[in-house]
């Protein structure tokens, strides 16, 4: 199991017109990135039949999969509009995907593991690195 024990994000969204909305956008994007990094996987059997063809089989992120988040904004007003606001919709996902994918690789680097995707495949990589699979 891959467990995210802490996740903190600091971004420059410019002037926060609605701080709660911006934080919600960041939280949603981070949940999406966590899902992409650790849960979502399209699987096929040896005959090419899709095994994850419904949302019951496909690993979508749920609230329980999301880590406790630390959120901070470090605003520098944009000079391209009178409000000084910047976009925030993709910021959570853009940073969370590489962060969540690289953290287990960093933690397991002493085993020679250089890539992970799902927790099950991470377990398989650990077993293989230890000579057990």
Image: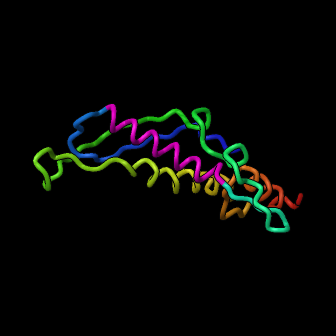
Compared with 116, 21 (above or below) is above
Does residue 94 belong to the magenta stretch?
no
Residue at 65 percent of width and 40 percent of height: 3
Residue at 48 percent of width and 35 percent of height: 69
Magenta stretch in the rendered image: 20-40
Compared with 35, 67 (above or below) is above
What is the chief secondary structure element of the magenta stretch?
A: helix
Q: Indicate the position of residue 127 as horizontal and vertical percent values.
A: 83, 56
Q: Quadrant of the C terminus?
A: bottom right
Q: Quadrant of the N terminus?
A: top right
In this picture, residue 5 sits left or right of residue 123: left
In this view of the protein, which residue sits in the foreground, 114 or 98? Answer: 98
Does residue 29 belong to the magenta stretch?
yes
In this view of the protein, which residue sits in the foreground, 121 or 90? Answer: 90
Residue at 57 percent of width and 56 percent of height: 102
Q: Indicate the position of residue 129 as horizontal and vertical percent values.
A: 80, 61
Q: Indicate the position of residue 105 as horizontal and vertical percent values.
A: 63, 57
Of all residues shown, which one is farthest toward the bottom?
47
Residue at 52 percent of width and 54 percent of height: 97
Number of labelled discs? 0
Of all residues shown, which one is farthest toward the left?
82
| Colouring | rainbow
Give the quadrant of residue 4.
top right
In this view of the protein, which residue sits in the foreground, 111 or 94? Answer: 94
Of all residues shown, which one is farthest toward the right?
132
Give the quadrant of residue 20.
top left
In this picture, residue 55 sits left or right of residue 67: right
In this picture, residue 127 sits left or right of residue 113: right
């Amino acid at each position: 199991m891959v467990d995210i024990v802490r996740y903190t994000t600091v971004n420059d969204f410019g002037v926060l017109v609605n701080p709660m909305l911006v934080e919600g956008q960041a939280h949603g994007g981070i949940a999406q990135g966590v899902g992409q990094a650790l849960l979502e996987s399209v699987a096929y059997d040896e005959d090419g039949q899709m095994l994850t063809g419904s949302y019951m089989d496909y690993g979508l992120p749920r609230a329980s999969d999301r880590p406790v988040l630390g959120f901070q904004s470090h605003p520098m007003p944009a000079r391209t509009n009178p409000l000084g606001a910047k976009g925030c919709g993709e910021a959570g996902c853009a940073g969370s995907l590489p962060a969540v994918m690289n953290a287990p690789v960093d933690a397991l680097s002493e085993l020679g593991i250089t890539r992970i995707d799902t927790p099950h495949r991470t377990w398989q990589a650990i077993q293989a690195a230890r000579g057990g699979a």
